[in-house]
Image (spheres, rainbow, N blue to C red):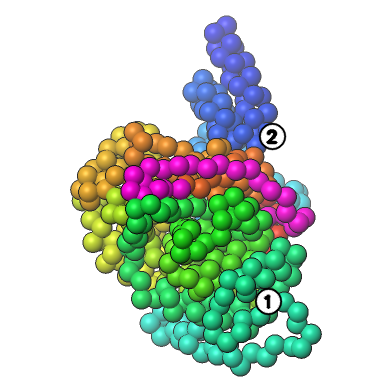
Amino acid sequence: METENSDVSRAEELKVLANEAFKAHKYAQAIDLYTQAVEINSHNAVYWANRSFAHLKLEEYGSAIQDASKAIEVDPKYSKGYYRRGAAYLAMGKFKEALKDFQQVKKLCPNDPDATKKLKECEKQVMKLKFEEAISVPESKRRSVADSIDFRSIDVEQQYTGARIEGDVITLDFVKKMMEDFKNQKCLHKRYACQIVLQTRELLRPLPSLVDISVPDGTHFTVCGDVHGQFYDLLNIFELNGLPSEENPYLFNGDFVDRGSFSVEIILTLFAFKCMSPSAIHLARGNHESKGMNKIYGFEGEVRSKLSETFVELFAEVFCCLPLAHVINEKIFVVHGGLFTDDGVKLSDIRAIDRFCEPPETGLMCEILWSDPQPQLGRGSSKRGVGLAFGPDVTKSFLQENNLDLIVRSHEVKDEGYEIEHDGKLITVFSAPNYCDQMNNKGAFIRFEAPEMKPNIVTFAAVPHPDIKPMVYANNFLRLFQ
C-alpha cells in the first residue's frame, strides 16, 4: 500500500515538472516527463490528455489523437480527452471527426460557454465543407485559373509608388525594390504579383518531379528548410549568405507558407528570384503547399486579405507544379519529408510521379511530403497521423540502392535548427527560427562546397518583425485553440 501511495506521489511530481516544462514551451521535455508519469500510473486520464496537448504543440497530431483516445478509454467522462482529440482532428482538417468529439464535450459540460463556442464553430466548418463538396467541380473538368488570366489587362494606378516590372523581364533591381517595400509593409501591385506567379508556373511545369542539380567544382550550393511565412528571417538568411544568383544558388525545401503572417511576401520573393534566374533558386513542394493546409493555417486567408480570391486558386495551381525532390551531384537526395512504406523505391519511381494534383493521403507523393525519421530500426506509425516514421536501416537501404550518400530533409522544428541522425546519413534542416514566435529554436541552412560536398551547417537566431502575430490569417476555428 505504501509503495502504491509512493508511486502515485511520484507520478504527480512528474506531472508538475511536465506542466512547468510545457509552460516554458519545452514540449519535448514535457512529453518525456508525462511519459514517465504514465509509466508509473497509466490509469490517470489527466497524464494522457496533457501529453496529448504537448504532442499538439509539436504538430504530432497522430500521437495527440492516440493519447487523447487513451485518456477517454481510462475515463470516458473526462471532457478534456475529447477536447484534445477534437483539436488534433481539427488541425489535420478532419472537421467531421472533430465535430463528434466537441459534441461529446458539450454533452459532458452543457453549461461551459467555451465548449458551446467551439462546438458552434465546428458545426459551421462542417456545413461549409459540405457546401464546398456540393458545388465542387471534378478535377478533370476544372478549368485552369492561370490560363484565364492576362496580367497585362490589370491597370496600374498612377498613384502606385511601389516596385514595377518593366516589360516581361524580372530584374534584380525590381526584386530588391520589392523586398524593400515588403520590409516596410507595403504591398506589391496585383498586376506584378500576377505576372510573377504566372511566369513561375511556366518555369515549373516542364520540370520533372525529381530535379537533378549539378554543382561544379569550386562552387557552392545552399539548402534551406521550412521558412513558414517568416519573411524577416528570410531577409536575414540573405543577409548572412547572400542573395540568390547563378554564383550563389539556393534550394528552398518546401513549407514556404502558412503559420507566419508574411507568407505572401515570402512566396512572391522566392518566385521572383526564380523568374529572374531559374538556376539561382530551386523550389521543392512541402506538405504546406496544398489547399488543405492553406485553408487551415493561414496562407489562404492572407492571400485573400493582401491580394484576392483569384490568387487563392492561382497559388493552389502553381503549388501543384512544384517538384517533389532534388538530387545534388548524383549524391545528395533532398526532399521535404522523408522516405517510403515500401522497400526498393528507385529515383526513377519518384521521377515518374504525376505531381500535378493535391497531395493524396497515401502513396509515394504523400510520404515524400509527410514522413519523419525515427531512431528505431524499421518503420513505425507516423506521430503526425500522415505518412510514416522510418528508421536508420530504411535510410541506409534507400541510399545504397540509389547510389547516394546523404538525405537532407526539413519538415520538423529542431532546437538547434538542424539535427544529424541515422549514423550521419540524414540531416534535418529547419530555417524558421523561434517558430511561431514561441519555440525559441534556432534556424539553420546548409552550404555544400564542390567537389567534397560536405555539409557546412550555419545556424542563426530569429530577428525582430512587425507586431503581426503568427496565425492571424489562420482559420478562425484553429485560432480558438492557440
* Looking at the image, residue 163 lies above or below residue 255: below
Name the image quarter holding residue 7: top right
Question: Which amino acid type is marked by label 1?
Answer: Ala
Question: Which amino acid type is marked by label 2?
Answer: Lys
Q: How many marks?
A: 2
Name the image quarter holding residue 29: top right
Image coords of residue 460 (percent x, y) = 60, 43
Image coords of residue 282 (percent x, y) = 44, 63
Look at 38% across and 82% down and name the residue there: 140
* Looking at the image, residue 242 lies above or below residue 443: below
Q: Confirm whether residue 77 shows in the render.
A: no
Name the image quarter holding residue 190: bottom right
* Looking at the image, residue 154 lies above or below residue 339: below
Q: Is residue 282 left or right of residue 103?
A: left
Which residues lie in the magenta part?
447-470
- Say few, some or many: other residues with alpha carbon within 10 Å of mark 2 (under 14 / 14 to 19 / 20 or more): few
Residue 462 lies in the magenta stretch: yes
Q: Residue furthest bottom?
A: 153
Point out the frontmost of discs 1 and 2: 1
Q: Nearer the viewer, residue 56 or 239?
A: 239
Q: Which residue in the protein does label 2 denote? A: 23
For the N terminus, the quadrant is top right
Look at 42% across and 73% down and name the residue there: 204
The secondary element bearing badge 1 is classed as loop
Q: Nearer the viewer, residue 172 or 387?
A: 172
Residue 110 lies in the magenta stretch: no
Q: CA distance from mark 1 to mark 2?
A: 44 Å
